[in-house]
Amino acid sequence: MFERWISEGIPEVIWISGFYFTHCFIAGVKQNFARTNKYPYDRVDLMFEVLKITQSVQGTVITGLFLEGASWDNIG
């Protein structure tokens, strides 16, 4: 998977369940944002938004996120 990322670039949608340490991936996303925008890493926070497949976004799009012991309220 990582060899393909090096040769073809990072995919548009990341399957987050494929990572063993998902928190490290998220930390990397935050670090890339902080470096790109010259913003302090410890001031960067995350915001999650459920998207329709056809939406275009800025940021990182993930798939494979699961809820345990909770339910999804699809209001809005």
Image: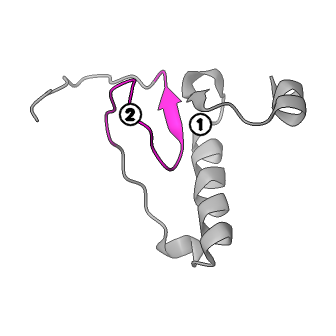
Q: How many marks?
A: 2
Q: Determine whether 17 is above or below 39 in the image.
A: above
Q: Nearer the viewer, residue 58 or 71?
A: 58
The location of residue 32, given as percent across then percent down, is 66, 59
Residue 16 located left or right of residue 65:
right
Q: Main secondary structure of the magenta part?
A: loop
The location of residue 14, given as percent across then percent down, is 59, 29
The location of residue 37, given as percent across then percent down, is 60, 73
Q: Residues within 10 Å of mark 1 (few under 14, many from 20)?
A: few
Mark 1: amino acid:
Thr
Q: Determine whether 64 is above or below 62 in the image.
A: above
What's the residue at 32%, 41% (across, down)? 49
Residue bearing the label numbered 2: 55
Of labels 1 and 2, earlier in sequence is: 1
Residue 10 located left or right of residue 42:
right
Q: Determine whether 43 is above or below 28 in the image.
A: below
Residue 33: which disc?
none
Name the quarter where the N terminus is drawn.
Answer: top right
What's the residue at 49%, 50% (across, down)? 58
Residue bearing the label numbered 1: 22
Whether residues under marks 1 and 2 lie with C-beta atoms below 8 angstroms apart, the answer is no
The location of residue 75, given as percent across then percent down, is 9, 31
Mark 2: amino acid:
Gln
Query: Is 31 part of what is drawn in magenta?
Result: no
SS at mark 1 in the image: helix
SS at mark 2 in the image: loop
Q: CA distance from mark 1 to mark 2?
A: 24 Å
- Magenta segment boundaries in residue numbering: 49-64
In the image, which is nearer the foreground, mark 1 or mark 2? 2
The quarter of the picture where residue 9 lies is: top right
Query: Is 50 part of what is drawn in magenta?
Result: yes
